[in-house]
Image: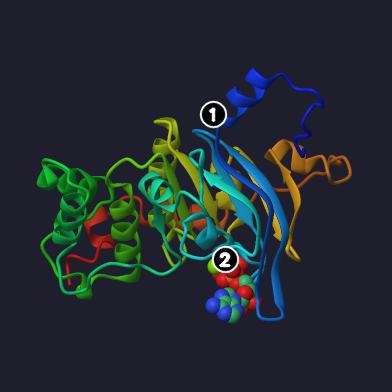
Amino acid sequence: MFVEKTPGQHATTATAQARSTAIHVQGLEKSYGKLEVLRGVDFDVARGSIFALLGSNGSGKTTTVRILATLLKADAGTVSVNSFDVATQPANVRESISLTGQFAAVDEILSGRENLVLVAKLRHLKDSGAIADDLLERFSLTDAAARRVSSYSGGMRRRLDIAMSLIGNSPVIFLDEPTAGLDPEGRIEVWHAVKQLAGHGTTVLLITQYLDEAEQLADRIAILHKGRIIANGTLAELKQLLPPATVEYVEKQPTLEEIFLAIIGGHDKSDATGTNN
Ligand SMILES: Nc1ncnc2c1ncn2[C@@H]1O[C@H](COP(=O)(O)OP(=O)(O)OP(=O)(O)O)[C@@H](O)[C@H]1O
Ligand SMILES: [Mg+2]
């Protein structure tokens, strides 16, 4: 559950811990006028792990991410990302992160490929075309690569937005509801990409409303409620908060998601990318 620091911890252990911590948040407070949104938020995210932040609408998840991403100033507390303090070293923090916001931030006039090439060039990467093509392939957007984004479906925009945030291999990635509005196949593609990222050592802070998404992806899950983290642990640890499971006979019915995927499974994925219209 909550990680308690052992009193009198050896200094080298503390340094090693700081190095293995990608995100450190302590006593974070933020109000908008009289509305106290964050009232002392504490959590740590280990390097290379996926940490899911859950909470009801308006609980302050996006506010937290905006502070971590240096887009918003905290009222109180300590926040560091990739060992850089967001208040005193914001430029270093920005170099360490990539953010996919809650609402897709793609350029409508450019094509999907042009959007990706643009970001790769802004990040001074060589082979921007090859990087773009690889990401288009990974997110099943190859067939729509040359089309203007204004003609994309919501799911295609979302996938392009996430692909754009992967350019440059930032050590820390913030994903604010990355699969909102995606169909089940699109969600699975995004999940796969997120797992791959963490597998390569990227730290992912994932904000989600979908509990199954947190179950599928997260190494640790925290729940933000009334301005504080009220639970923080692995899925197994969180399950222990409930009374022990009882054994019941339940006839297993397929979920609608399983049915949906089975029915469309035989069809060409290019249909789902909306290229045959
Ligand atoms: N710029 C702002 N000015 C005033 N109030 C704000 C501002 N931004 C957010 N809020 C309020 O702060 C609270 C937290 O908002 P936030 O967007 O962080 O929540 P959230 O957990 O991301 O919600 P959702 O799940 O709907 O995305 C909400 O009550 C919201 O209305
Ligand atoms: Mg939000």
What residue is drawn where x is 60% and y is 37%?
219
Q: Name the residue under label 1.
A: 19
Judge the density around disc 1: few (<14), some (14-19), many (≥20) Cα neighbours within 10 Å: few
Quick one: 106 or 122, which is closer to the camera? 122
Disc 1 element: helix
Q: Residue 268: tell me if it is visible.
A: no
Quadrant of image for the N terminus: top right
**Left/right of residue 60 with respect to residue 194 in the rendered view:** right
Quick one: 91 or 247, which is closer to the camera? 91
**Which of disc 2 and disc 1 is earlier in sequence?**
1
Name the residue at the bottom extreme. Answer: 33
**1 vs 2, front mark:** 1
**Assess mark 2: CB under 8 A from ligand 1?**
yes
Quick one: 62 or 216, which is closer to the camera? 62
The circle drawn on residue 189 is none
Name the residue at the front extreme. Answer: 88
Asked if the residue at tag 2 contacts the one at tag 1, i.e. Cβ–Cβ closer than 8 Å, the answer is no
Q: In which quarter of the image is ligand 2?
A: bottom right
**Left/right of residue 230 with respect to residue 130 in the rendered view:** right
**Left/right of residue 257 with respect to residue 112 in the rendered view:** right
Disc 2 element: helix
Q: Name the residue under label 2.
A: 63
Q: Is residue 263 above or below residue 133?
A: below
- Point out residue 184 in the picture as x, y percentages from the top left corner: 44, 57
What residue is drawn where x is 19% and y is 54%?
122
- Point out residue 73 in the picture as x, y percentages from the top left corner: 54, 64
Instruction: Inspect the image, locate mark 2, and give the three-letter code of the amino acid beneath it.
Output: Thr
Instruction: Inspect the image, locate mark 1, and give the three-letter code of the amino acid beneath it.
Output: Arg
